[in-house]
Image (spheres, rainbow, N blue to C red):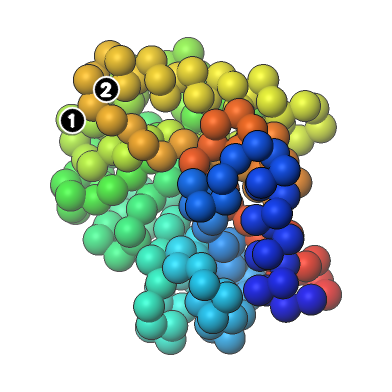
Amino acid sequence: MTVGERLTAVRERIGRAGRDPDDITIVAVTKGFGPEVCRQVLDAGLRILGENRVQEALKKMDDVAGPDWHLIGHLQTNKVRQAAGRFALIQSVDSIHLAEALARADPAQAVLVEVNVAREPQKSGIDPAHALELVDQVGRLLDLQGLMGMGPTDQDPTPAFNELRTLRDEAQQRSGKSLPILSMGMSGDFEAAVAAGSTMVRLGQVLFGPRNA
């Protein structure tokens, strides 16, 4: 199957999950793939590419013209100056220390606050108990667009996704500002995510097949 054919199947699955596919932004996760695959994504009609590592993304930016690039992996503070201003959206802000470093580099940088609603130590993200405080702080420093989170590895992800949506709604009420992006859902659980209110999904394998293929 081509990327375009897989994308059509994804959109059909979003529809069966009860949402209009046009309301869901798809980030094609191109980590581990070269420029040619990135161009296939663009040819299929997607405009946003997601990368986990700054250095890998920067190399592709030089070779692939046209997309918006999102950083979806953990950002180390020593990579902030390389990342700030290069990504349309940094989805993984999870500490005030990181937010302050980004603000010094580019206060206009668009970001999401990453929340560890899965409560798994191997996952990045602020503890949900402290998420609203961090959202308030980040919103004063950067162009905060919403929240990001991942579902748990071996459990029903729906409660975690519902919690993230609730946190987003509470953050909007507290601040009086719109936080339109709710980035949740990956290849294995995006249908549960869109049913729970996701506006943005981050998809790799379901678009490209197994990475070792």
Q: Which residue is mark 2?
A: 136
Q: Position of residue 196 (x, y in %)?
A: 61, 29
At x 31%, y 21%, the residue is 172
Q: Quadrant of residue 36?
A: bottom right
Q: Which residue is mark 1?
A: 140
Dot 2 amino acid type: Asp
Q: Quadrant of residue 1?
A: bottom right
At x 31%, y 54%, the residue is 80
Whether residue 41 is visible to the viewer of this picture, yes or no, is yes
Whether residue 55 is visible to the viewer of this picture, yes or no, is no
CB atoms of marks 2 and 1 within 8 Å: yes
For the C terminus, give its image quadrant.
bottom right
Residue 20 in the image: above or below residue 67: above
Q: Nearer the viewer, residue 23 or 207?
A: 23
Left or right of 61: which side holds 86? left
- Residue 186 bears which disc, if any? none
Residue 122 in the image: above or below residue 175: below
Give the spatial CA distance, label 2 vs label 1. Answer: 7 Å
Left or right of 50: which side holds 85? left
Q: Position of residue 156 (x, y in %)?
A: 77, 27
Left or right of 143: which side holds 147? right
Which SS class for mark 1? Answer: helix
Dot 1 amino acid type: Arg
At x 38%, y 82%, the residue is 65
Which SS class for mark 2? Answer: helix
Q: Position of residue 62 (x, y in %)?
A: 38, 83
Q: Quadrant of residue 177?
A: top left
Residue 9 in the image: above or below residue 90: below
